[in-house]
Structures are given as structure tokens and as C-alpha cells.
Amino acid sequence: MTGRRPTGEGTIYRRKDGRWEGAAYLPTASGGRRRIRVYGKTRSEAHTRLNEYLATSQRGVPVPERSWTIAAYLDYWMREVAPLTLRPRTIELYESVIRNHLKPRLGMKPLLRLSVAELQMILNRQLADGHSVRTVRATRTVLSAALTRAMREELVTRNVARLVELPAWEKKDRTPWTAAEASRFLAQARNDALFPAYLLLMILGLRRGEMLGLRWSDVDWDRNEIHIRQQLQQIGGQLQVGPVKTSAGKRDLPLLPILRTVLARHQARQNTAANTWNLVVTTTAGSPLWPRNFVRAFHALRERAGLRRIRVHDLRHMTATLLKDLGAPARDAQLILGHAHISTTQQIYQHANTATQQTALDRLGQALLVTSDDSGRSRQIQPSIAESVVTSTSIISGGPGGARTLDTLLKRRKMLGDRHSLTSVITQLRARTNTHLLGYVAVTNSRQPERVDVGPLHN
């Protein structure tokens, strides 16, 4: 039985295998015409599918030049489109998601036939198979990016990945080291060849890749600045140098005196002949340091210091949190860390501190409960977070611990907990947004008139 329809509405007929087929010639994006075919178990089913194509064409949406499977389109997208907008590391991660999750589950599916309901069931099954919410959300993210491009190329009319629903991903509650814990680590690392690397991470809050990619040409000895311009990453089993993560990551930070001293000594001891990449942090042989080897060295040192396990990236969270606790303006912390948005600094990197919260609430309570009889009295509040940095200062500068520490950069003694001292530092931060408050506390809090040698740094 053959059903003929008016011109332009295609035809529907029964095949020899018993199925029903609908066909019609529809315009393509190049101006030509392409015959599309649909199938159904009944005439009504084939009729409905054919009408969907016709309705789409009548809205001015051309049919694709070819029939894409999801796997074929993902290959095209990763080969021709993704390299134009994505960084190499991101491409590597996307390729992993496509290879391990999208192609096995959706690869043979026609691009035009993917529905919201079907994708929802596939992602639900992925969760049921034991994959984490983060992995499933990454699967949806990669597919959504590809389908967005397909919409721009007029291959599909909607992005079904945006319409599925997934559980919220709850990030692990991580607690970065305190200043006291950082002091213990620095004490253990005092004579380690990677001591300069740890200072760069903790004082300037650099990303691991930024620290490993820092060149000596980025250290401006004359202007006392460090220019953050590139990062070192492992991509496809090879070390590659590339631009920093975002445009905001391209920044200039102060070369604090303690960093200047440590880096100068480090440069004098480095194997410059083998350092063809001109990197600040290298192996003892002078070659680039692989990120995984740096992480391994960090944890070995951490275990010797008897400290709880954190990620190397958590040192960046520590710097952000200590800046907050020391009173640095959030905008300055954002610029120091190289975040594009201040919300990233405040909501992700700056963690709560119960000590500073209690101090603030104590002050509030005193302000509310003060009476006219004792309003003039001096009240003692809890020590500020700055006092916990004293030990860090002595480790870095070589002075003994205590309320007053010896340092190589001051010509007078100054109490670390003095409120006026902190106010002065904050004023400098506001005057120069890239001045790092934590570094100033580590350097400028106290000193005796004599210069004290930093001590030997062993390779």
C-alpha cells in the first residue's frame, strides 16, 4: 500500500520487511536538496516522524548535509572546533570523557534522534553503575558543549543535554593548613632543594603550574616584581608550557625581600647549563620538574613533618584564607590569586576561621554590652590570627620564635600583634593592589638592627 501526499509533503509506503517508510526532499544549508527517510512500525508512526522533519523545514531550519551519528559528530567537533577555543589540558579531559563515557553509551545513536528522555535514562544508568555525580555531570557538560555547536551549525534544533536533570554535586569540605601547620612544614623544608617552590606557593598563592612554569626572565630584580605569564603542564604524556589559566591569571606580584634572598641563593646554586627552559624550579639536574614528581616530593616532606594530608592546591586556599584573616581587602586577594571573579576568591578559596569569627563576635558582644561606667576601659580580646604567623616568620627569616622575631629586612623591632602595624600593611595593600599581605607579615613584622644571615640552602 502506498500513500501519496500533496507535492512537497513527501511519501509514505510500506516496505517489504513490513515496516513503514516516509521520505521527502528538503532544503539543505548549502541551498541544495536532500532526501530524508524515516521509519516506523505503523503508518501513523512513520507519518508522525516525517511531519516533524517537514515542520522543522517550514520554520526555515535546513536539514544537515549528511546523517551524523553522535560519535562521528564528537570526532568532528574535537578535531575541527574544540582546538579553536579550548586549552590543551581541557581538550585532553574532554577526550577522556568522550572515550570512556559518551561513545560507549551514545556513539551509534543518530544525532537527530537523541531525545531528552533517552539521555536522562542513560545518565541515570551511569549513576546507578556507580559513577560519581561529578563524573556524570562532566559527561553532560561535554555533550552539551558539542550540541551547542551542532545547533549553531543548524544540525539540531535544541540542546537536549541542557534539559536533563542531575543531582547537585556537593564538593568535599576541605580545610587548608593553618599558619601554624604551614610553619611546621617550612621548618621541615628549610634545607630542601624545593624550599623556594614552597615559598612561592604559600606566600604568593601561585598555582602549581604557574610555579613550575616560572622563568628567571619573569623575575624582575630591578623593579622587585615577579611576572606570572605561563604555566607548565603535563599533556598527552609530555611537558608543555602554555599561557596561564585565564587572562586574570596574567599578573605582576611583588618580589618580597625574603623571596628575593631565597631565589638569589637558589639561582646561584642551580645547574644553569642544563636548564635550557630557563625555569626557576627544576630538578637538581636542571631539567623541568614533572608535576607528579613535585606532588610526590611535597607529600614525602609533609609526612616527615607529621602533618595531615592536603592537596598541593590547598596551599592556594590557605594563602587566600590567611589573607582574609589578616584583613586584606577581598579585591586585593582576588588580584594576588589571579581570579577572574571576586566571588571565586570569597566563596571557594577563602575558608571560615572559627578563631577570627569568635574574635569578631567578642567585639560585637563588648560593643553591645558596654555600659557608661566602663565604656572608657581598655578591653582585652583574643589574639588575632597574626600571632600564629610568628613561627612562620622565624622559620623563613632564621630568627627565633616568640612575640619578637629576628628578620633581615627591618631596622627596628615591631610587635606582630600590634594593630597599628597591621593597619599600615593594609594601607600598603590598598595603595598597591598586588602587594601580598601575607608576605609582608612574614617579612616586616620584626627585626633587630643587625642583619641575620638566612642560612645555607642545600640542593
Image (cartoon, rainbow, N blue to C red):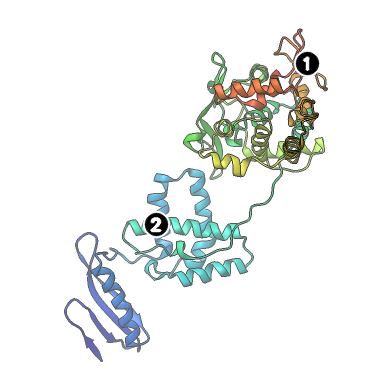
Residue 356 point in image, percent of width and height: 73, 37
Contact? badges 1 and 2 (CB < 8 Å): no
Residue 422 point in image, percent of width and height: 68, 23
* Residue sitting nearer the eye, 131 or 435: 435
State left or right for residue 320 relative to residue 102: right
- Residue 285 seen in render: no
**Residue pictured at 79% horizontal, 39% vertical:** 307
Residue 182 position (above or below residue 401): below
Q: Picture quarter containing residue 446?
A: top right
From the image, tell me which residue sits under label 2: 148
Q: Picture quarter containing residue 41?
A: bottom left
Residue 419 point in image, percent of width and height: 71, 23
State left or right for residue 217 relative to residue 12: right
Residue furthest top as drawn: 450
* Residue sitting nearer the eye, 13 or 237: 13
For the residue carrying disc 2, how many other residues have a C-alpha within 10 Å: few (<14), some (14-19), or many (20+)?
Answer: some
Residue 437 point in image, percent of width and height: 64, 26
For the residue carrying disc 1, how many other residues have a C-alpha within 10 Å: few (<14), some (14-19), or many (20+)?
Answer: many
Q: Could you give the CA–CA distance between mark 1 and mark 2, rounded to whole angstroms?
A: 60 Å
* Residue sitting nearer the eye, 275 or 144: 144
Of pointers 1 and 2, the one earlier in the residue sequence: 2
**Residue pictured at 35% horizontal, 87% vertical:** 42
Quadrant of the drawing holding the C terminus? top right
State left or right for residue 76 relative to residue 431: left
State left or right for residue 94 relative to residue 29: right
- Residue 162 seen in render: yes
From the image, tell me which residue sits under label 1: 406
Residue 11 position (above or below residue 152): below
**Residue pictured at 69% horizontal, 46% vertical:** 174
Secondary structure type for disc 1: loop
The amino acid marked with disc number 1 is Leu
